[in-house]
Image: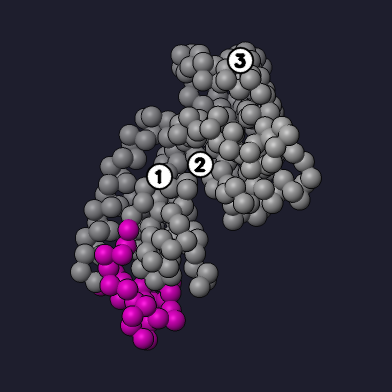
Amino acid sequence: MEIVLLTGMSGAGRSTAARALEDLGFFVTDNLPPQLLPDVLRIARDEGIDRLAVVVDVRGGRLFDQLPPALDRVRAQGERPTIVFLEARDDVLVRRFESSRRPHPLQASGRVLDGLARERDIVAPLRGDADLLLDTSDLTLHDLRRAIERAFEADMPARLKATVVSFGFKYGIPVDADHVADMRFLPNPFWVPELRALSGLDEACNEYVVSRPGAVEFLDDYSAMIQRIADGYLVEGKRFVTIAIGCTGGRHRSVAIAEHLSARLVKAGVETTVIHRDLGRE
């Protein structure tokens, strides 16, 4: 049985993700008291349900504290749930709560930010155990649905799924990155007049970046490292990895290297999606 535990920050898109899982054929149960998780799994198994998604979050109040021991009991039964954690920046979450005119479940008589701070403290251990961490700050509802669909397409063999994200350090490191690589050791095409207006997607800029000393060696070593850990990730039940490739502004070096790294991973049999987070931001 494929089991997904969907959790994360309030306002980060759990309802959208749950609907996407339901459309993919999952039996979805929402706001389940955590201590009932082993019982739900037993019932689902007895009823022949082969895809189960359980939404658990801080709406359960003190019951949420029972999630770690419930997960321990589930794992003791030989099950390995895939934990999906939805994240977003505080300013984005505040705007979403204000637009919906709903209070945060933990804000009590305080502000939404107070509730978010309490929630982050409570869910921090679960965030650290997440198999798939999705930052929805800059995603539309359709983007989030597509991300869930890519991750849980039916009839796909169990293999590592990688997301390669190019970014600019000036805009911050992606919060959902499992691995971060810094391309600022390569010469910056920004200082080459004929390349400044181009991006790493343009052939001239792309070739310039990859032809610099150390670029190919980095690609060789880094792609080999990802391939080397892929089997170990799968053995441990981790099917998703996010690789962040950064440069100063996220326009030239990181974009070019992300494209080349993705091509190498695909060739090695790693299902890969490329996202250029900050391209066009300047």
Which image quadrant is residue 32 in?
top right
Identify the residue at horizontal 32%, vertical 58% (top origin).
182
Q: Residue at x 43, y 54 (%)?
A: 173
Q: Residues within 10 Å of mark 2 (few under 14, many from 20)?
A: many
Label 3: element kind: helix
Dot 3 or dot 1, earlier in sequence: 3
In this picture, which residue range is highlighted in magenta? 182-211
Seen in the picture, residue 188 relative to 101 is either above or below; the reply is below
Residue 133: which disc?
Answer: 2
Q: Are marks 2 and 1 in contact (CB under 8 Å)?
A: yes
Amino acid bearing label 2: Leu
Residue 217 is marked as none
Q: Is residue 169 visible?
A: yes
Question: Would you name the residue on which mark 3 appears?
Answer: 35
Q: Position of residue 127 (x, y in %)?
A: 50, 35
Task: Please name the predominant secondary structure of the magenta segment in the image.
Answer: loop
253 relative position to 83: left or right: left
Q: Residue shown at 44%/81% (left/top)?
A: 197
- Which residue occupies 33% across, 34% down? 232
Q: Amino acid at mark 3?
A: Gln
SS state under label 1: loop
Q: Residue 10: where, in percent of width, then height?
A: 65, 38
Query: How far apart, in angstroms, are the residues tagged by discs 3 and 1?
Result: 30 Å
How far apart in space, not on screen, are marks 3 and 2 (Cα)?
A: 24 Å
Cα gap from disc 2 to disc 1, whole angstroms:
9 Å
Q: Amino acid at mark 1?
A: Asp
Residue 224: x percent and y percent?
Answer: 26, 49
- Does 263 sit above or below residue 72? below
Q: Position of residue 168 (x, y in %)?
A: 43, 63
